[in-house]
Amino acid sequence: MKREIGIVGAGVGGLHLALYLQKHGVDATIITDREPHEYRHSRLLNTVAHHHVTIAREDYLGIDHWSKPELFYAYHDHYFNFPQPLHFRGDFTKPSRAVDYRIYLPVLMEEFMKRGGRIEYRRVDEVDIPVLAARFELLVVSTGKGGFGQIFPYRPELTPFSQPQRRLCVGLYNGVRQTNPMSVTLSVSPGHGEMIVIPTVTFDGIATALLMENVPGGDLEELATLDYAQDRKHFLRTLLAKLERHHPTTFDRIDPAQFDLAQEQDLLQGGVVPTVRNTTAEFADGKCAIALGDVHSVVDPMMGQGANMASYAAFVLGEEIVKGDALDVRFCEKVDLRRQDRVLAASRWTNMMLAPPSPALGMLLGTMGQNKLLADEFTENFNYPEVQWDRISTPQRIQAWIDRTSAPHEQRIAAA
Ligand SMILES: Cc1cc2nc3c(=O)[nH]c(=O)nc-3n(C[C@H](O)[C@H](O)[C@H](O)COP(=O)(O)OP(=O)(O)OC[C@H]3O[C@@H](n4cnc5c(N)ncnc54)[C@H](O)[C@@H]3O)c2cc1C
């Protein structure tokens, strides 16, 4: 029997899976609510950076359309706005890149169709899921952070918060000077929030994403509700004043005369409740629906993990579908066991960074200021959140990591 997979949702998770299956000769039908042409004028969706492990998957799928070296960034610059500022750099082994998803997703949808893939356009509701599951050998649900809560209930033991931990104000701006080579800045204003500054490929070339993660009750919180459309000048004036006070190294890169949203719809305000869900629903006929991407685990965007996880999990699922005998409940369990270490580590690590730093984490951050090897490994682990979690999940592990990377070079070689 020819294998046929249904995929609800054409985000990065659904599309990477669909393209993977297509490459391996497995029939996949995408059912989604948005056509490619609807993305061009939509509000900013997110500000996603892909790390090199995800870019390698894009290469494998033949969809790496943004391969010019000048579109990549090479390192993370960290700035902590303490009375005695802390400033250090961590390098990746291979560069990362951010492409506006309003460009990225429709290009992948078109590519899938060009290669013979089918996309049906309609909104799917929770009641439709069992019907769709009956139609396919396996139904994959990758509809993003809404989650279909009746079918995939959240897991309280892995979902510590019931409210967003940051109030987001995210925009794509012109008028911010890029570093040379390009880099991402992680800027922290203790007690008030973090800001991730990302060079991003968008409609008119490269603009700068300011992903402002504002602590509820802090001085930056009002940015999450400040109305750009109602009073653009007031919005920009307020934002610049806050940047000068809380994120001064980024403020220094701004030309106030040029500083503005790249387009008026390039602003996103709100918050995310980090949530981990059960991933499998089995129906009376033994058919299953399996969750992928944000339906499985939504993380706060601070550490840039959600889309990279969705892509990783799509490949794990794709590999198992290609070699699986029966796509039943046991199949779903095995998929979960294979992907959970990395997916859950991304969630745990991000949740840890949302809380006030423990003494051990504070020591780690302070040590990175003097230990470039440690800062480089911390940065490279954005590709491998399970390794990051191995390093930082307990004070003992943090101490062991500091000790190893602080040892003289010869001792490190001998230990390796
Ligand atoms: C501000 C911000 C910055 C971020 N930065 C990063 C980053 O740097 N790195 C990173 O890895 N992640 C980042 N993320 C997270 C990332 O955006 C998500 O984790 C990722 O896009 C999830 O992909 P997905 O395929 O699971 O879902 P989505 O991308 O949300 O796709 C869902 C798909 O389902 C469709 N759909 C939804 N509901 C229905 C329905 N009822 N019926 C039919 N179709 C439906 C949608 O149209 C869409 O096609 C960021 C998120 C935000 C908000």
Image (cartoon, grey):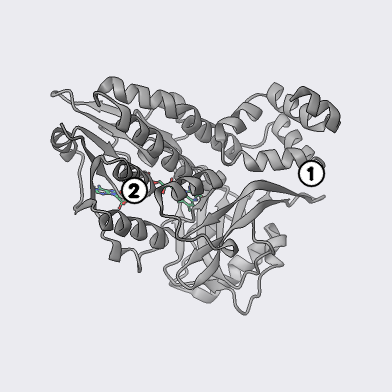
User: Residue 229's spot in the image, x, y percent?
Assistant: 43, 72
Residue at the (51%, 63%) spot, across then down: 171
User: Residue 10's spot in the image, x, y percent?
Assistant: 31, 50
Marks 2/1: CA distance?
39 Å
Is disc 2's CB within 8 Å of ligand 1? yes
Q: Quadrant of the N terminus?
A: top left
Residue 279 relative to residue 101: left or right = left
Quadrant for residue 126, please give it.
top left
Circles 2 and 1: CB atoms closer than 8 Å: no
Nearer to us in this view, 13 or 123: 13
Q: Give the farthest residue toward the bottom.
A: 257
Residue at the (62%, 48%) spot, across then down: 94
Along the polypeptide, which appears first: circle 2 or circle 1?
2
Residue wearing tag 2: 15
Q: Amino acid at mark 1?
A: Gly
User: Residue 253's spot in the image, x, y percent?
Assistant: 69, 68
Residue at the (33%, 47%) spot, across then down: 19
Residue 403 relative to residue 278: left or right = right
Nearer to us in this view, 270 or 410: 410
Residue wearing tag 1: 369
Nearer to us in this view, 83 or 261: 261
Residue density around tag 1, few if under 14, some if 14–19, many if 20 or more, within 10 Å? some
